[in-house]
Amino acid sequence: MIVTYLQKSEITAKRRTTTPRYNRSSAVLPTMWQIKMNDKRWRRVYVECGREAASPYIIFQCKKLFLGSYFLNRFGLTTDHNNLIGRLL
């Protein structure tokens, strides 16, 4: 499986919204954060959870674009999925 990362130059803005409903038994959790990319569309940030790890990503052109270590440090990630993307741009 090839992992594709989102480039910081592709993001133009972020916003905090209400957390959408989700299936509690699912390994994929939607966050309250959305990212605006160069194409001027807002995309929800999701978190895919494993046993002891979580990977935030967005869906772009039917593919997952993961947020790399640059974003993990910059966003102030915590274990609470509602506070995952705190400080962008």
Image (cartoon, rainbow, N blue to C red):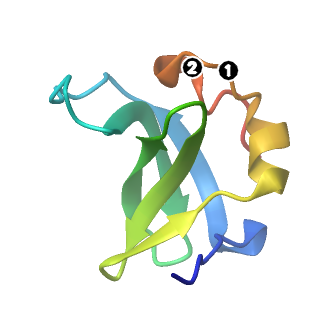
Tell me which amino acid carries mark 2: Asn
Q: Quadrant of residue 25?
A: top left
**Whole-percent x and y of residue 85?**
62, 33
Residue drawn at point x = 65 percent, y = 72 percent: 5
**Which residue lies most toward the top here?**
80
Q: Residue 10, labelled with which disc?
A: none
Are the two marked residues, 2 and 1, in contact with CB atoms closer than 8 angstroms? Answer: yes
Residue at the spot 67% in from the left edge and 27% down from the top edge:
86
Task: Please name the amino acid that badge 1 sits on.
Answer: Thr
| Nearer to us: label 2 or label 1 | 1
Instruction: Tell how many labels.
Output: 2
The residue that label 2 is drawn on is 83
- The residue lying furthest to the front in this view is 51
Q: Could you say where residue 49 lies in the image, as x and y percent from the top left?
A: 45, 38
Q: Earlier in the sequence, mark 2 or mark 1?
A: 1
Return the residue nearer the eye: 13 or 30: 30
At a point 38% along the width and 66% down the height, the residue shown is 59
